[in-house]
Image (cartoon, helix red, strand yellow):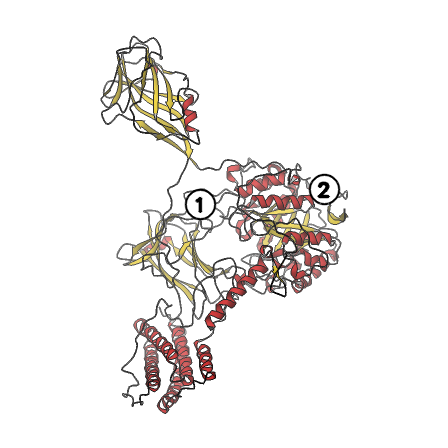
Amino acid sequence: MKKKLRKFLAVMMTFLLVATLFAPMVSAEENGNGEEEAPLVNPLPISQDPHVSNYEKYPALLDNGVPKASEGGALSLKEVNGQMTLVDKNNNPIQLRGMSTHGLQWFGEIVNENAFAALADDWGSNMIRLALYVGENGYATRPELINKVYDGIDLAIENDMYVIVDWHVHAPGDPRADVYSGAEEFFLTIAEKYPNNPNILYELANEPSSNNNGGPGITNDEAGWEAVKEYADPIVEALRNSGNADDNIIIVGSPNWSQRPDLAADNPIDDHHTMYTVHFYTGTHNGTNDSYPEETPSDKRSNVMANAKYALDNGVAVFATEWGVSEANGDNGPYLNEADIWLNFLNKNNISWANWSLTNKNETSGSFTPFQLNVSEATPLDPGDGQVWTKEQLSLSGEYVRSRIIGEEYEPIDRTPRETFTEVIWDFNDGTTQGFGVNAGSTLEGFTVTNENNALQIAGISEANSVWDVRISADNWDETVDIAGAQELSMEIIVDEPTMVEIGAIPQSASAGWANPVEVAVSPEDFDLQEDGNYMAVLTLTAEDAPNLSNIANSSEDSLLNNIILLINTEDADAISLDNISVSGDRESIPEPVVHDEKGTATLPSTFEDGTRQGWDWHSESGVKTSLTIEEANGSNALSWEYAYPEVKPSDGWATAPRLDFWKDNLVRGDNEFVAFDFYIDPVEERATEGEISINLTFQPPSMGFWAQAPSTFDIDLEALDEATLTEDGLYHFEVEIDITNITNLQDDTELRNMMLIFADGESDFAGRVYVDNVRFDMSLEKKVEVLSRTIAELLEQIETIEADNAERIAELEDQIAELEEQLNELVDSSVVEELQRIIEDLLAQIAALEQQVQELKDAANGVTPQPGNGDGSSDDVDNGTTDGGDNGSTDGENNGSEEGESGSTEDEDSDSSDGAEETGSSSKEGKDGEKLPNTATNMFNFLMVGLMLLAIGIVTFVIKRKNVAIK
């Protein structure tokens, strides 16, 4: 019952977190009577329907673009038509539109002259946003990244664009966190280098949020805004007092990932040129036609668009410094119909916007085509001297946003994957005419159609006067061929001596009958002598020559060729032969489906011995999505796939990386210290000679902003591959261990949700097959002994309180004891240190004593008088159970797994001790007192407590002595 209650509470906490993060999805509330209240604003639905532009409904999408920075000049804020808005040097409303970079520490290659020129000229942008991450390997640890900011500012000014300098607060979400302590100095440095430059806008805090990855977060309420304001106020004051940013626009983020400009409107910063951000993703944040009524409490304001309206209605200016056409996680979609709604709202209200983002990362919100193995190459972030990215190099997001920046109609290109092909329809290699014979429309009589030397011979035609006299057709052909995409019809013509031959063709289908052809000729000069003494030429007809070829090939209803009529004429030959009649062209490429082995049930440790993938799959952003199968490696089942890193490397080593994803309910670290697995590689010859494979590990806990990456990696140096262990089946074997104890803010009971393994490209030439096996949480032997000792101590305490007639609890104890004994036996098998072996033997002795106590409890419950022990503390009636899929060395109370969805909650794991106490209490209240432990057990307990104290001393001594000894 208690476990059910914990599960219910976890579900409720998950719901509440989702409602906080993605509040617009909540459409109704309950009143005090438990009844649903009507929503304060009605959210517009979100769907993935195909995009249809509706410019009558959304006219603000078409406005012929935005003015350049040189036209707009110095920016300021002014009230226009009752709303505070951005105005130019002449106090006329001005809208800034453009792109945001991704993190400059990852995709800094975008800062180049050709890219900025393309954005300014081909895209029509009048603004660019430079996203300088501070944490996450950003400015805080790489202060040299300020040079990227300088370069970006210079290029923006040169290309007549405004530029937003974005101090990218992301992880952690509290801008007051230590990692952001250099904010004021940073902005003053920029302002000093570019004093009062009208092109520059300062964004002080990208997305304040509850994200506690790497530090604290803030709340989604007035207190959260007060935290942002406490951070921003002194920076605003310092910039104004510096004399170098007297009137530059300053932009300040708002709580809940900058979805709450309404909170800023209730308590704005005291400054004349400060705006507030609103961030949204069209697949997550619903639009609305409504506004919040006056006096709506802040905790009732959850729709992001309505929050922006509220801010405008209450006297502050808003800037959408980040938005995307995907869901909030950057994936799925694109949601372009919803984007039309949002952009029409922004344009109509003169709200400036920057789209996320200028990257070739494999996510929907990226502007450029990403690398996908066997699908596409990554678009270079430098478009080259032409200073234009082709539409084919843009993603759907990039193509759409470019049109919306320009203010023109969006006309997407056909992105259907296509392939060139040639298909031989009639080859006559079976010795027959393959259905061909004299067509009934022929005017010449007496000519024959036969198969000679595996070619179709037409003889007795010298008396023909034109192509209309000799007609053959495949009337007796009983097959059909799909010729969709065909553009040409070709055939080989074989003659005894070179001559002129002309042919007309009428391909036919069930719906395409006759269409007058245009005859095409080959001349004597077109023939080449063959080894058999004959001459051959190839005659090709286009769709213009044979109109029915196009009619059939381009038909969406019937592209099946079922016959063909050929009209033939020669200058002086009596017989010709035709061979290899074929069609060629360009058609939709339908790739072979990727077939994976059965996914199975998420299981950790993952040994794959059941023949399934045990829950492992490709992450949506994986650059590799080849077939995941179960193959044998080193005598064991393993998860396997083939892949190759590209020769031309994108800027991000993760872009081409295989990313394995594993979700499991209640996945927590517990007492474990690292993730371990066996990794085998089988490279193609000469394709593992340079660079490295860098294995990264990350979790996506909802409570930590969905990102918690292990700082260390496991790197495989391919140039030193000969030094690796080689298995009997010829595989290179690596025992991977990645430390998970040093992930900032990650607690033992933090719900991890899912785990990712990323096999990043370190300038490697690798190609081949790899294998992963025995994926598990693990810990050192010392830690295992510590955990098991603690568990035994807890069991000793529990036994003292258990009533003799509590059979269910006794059975649970027996299972726990059996599991502990199994784990201890495993430690004996793997131990190599003499002192540790002695400690383990002591623990096994304590297990035996526990088993004896359990037997005494059972005897007492059954009314059996306790008998003296056999002298060694053991019991003859012991249930030697084994663990069922538990982690090697983990405690019985540990749960491993994940929760579906983008949010979740952390569960408090109650120990078995508390469970037992509750059940005992309940039993007492019902009058079922039962018998207490017999004196024999009590004496045994006292003896064991003394032994446990000695054991603890021994463990401490051992750990001190062996702390520098590496134990594998």
- Where is residue 954 drawn, in percent x and y? 38, 82
Q: At numbered mark 2, what does the secondary structure look like: helix, strand or loop?
A: helix
Q: Which corner quadrant holds the C terminus? A: bottom left
Q: At numbered mark 1, what does the secondary structure look like: helix, strand or loop?
A: loop
Dots 1, 2 in contact, CB < 8 A = no
Q: Quadrant of residue 826?
A: bottom left
Question: How many other residues sit within 10 Å of disc 2, few (<14), some (14-19) or many (≥20)?
Answer: many
- Where is residue 542 drawn, in percent x and y? 41, 22
Q: Amino acid at mark 1?
A: Gln
- The reply to whether residue 447 is in sight is yes
Q: Going 29% across and 83% down the picture, which residue do you hit?
A: 875
Nearer to us of marks 1 and 2 is 1
Q: Amino acid at mark 2?
A: Gly
Question: How many other residues sit within 10 Å of disc 1, few (<14), some (14-19) or many (≥20)?
Answer: many
Residue 884 vertical placement versus 47 (above, below): below
- The reply to whether residue 140 is in sight is no
Real-space CA distance between mark 1 and mark 2, rounded to the nearest whole angstrom: 41 Å
Mark sitting on residue 72:
2
Image side of residue 122 versus residue 768, left or right: right
**In the foreground, 928 or 525:** 928
The residue pinned by badge 1 equals: 372
Mark sitting on residue 672:
none
Name the N-terminal-most of marks 1 and 2: 2
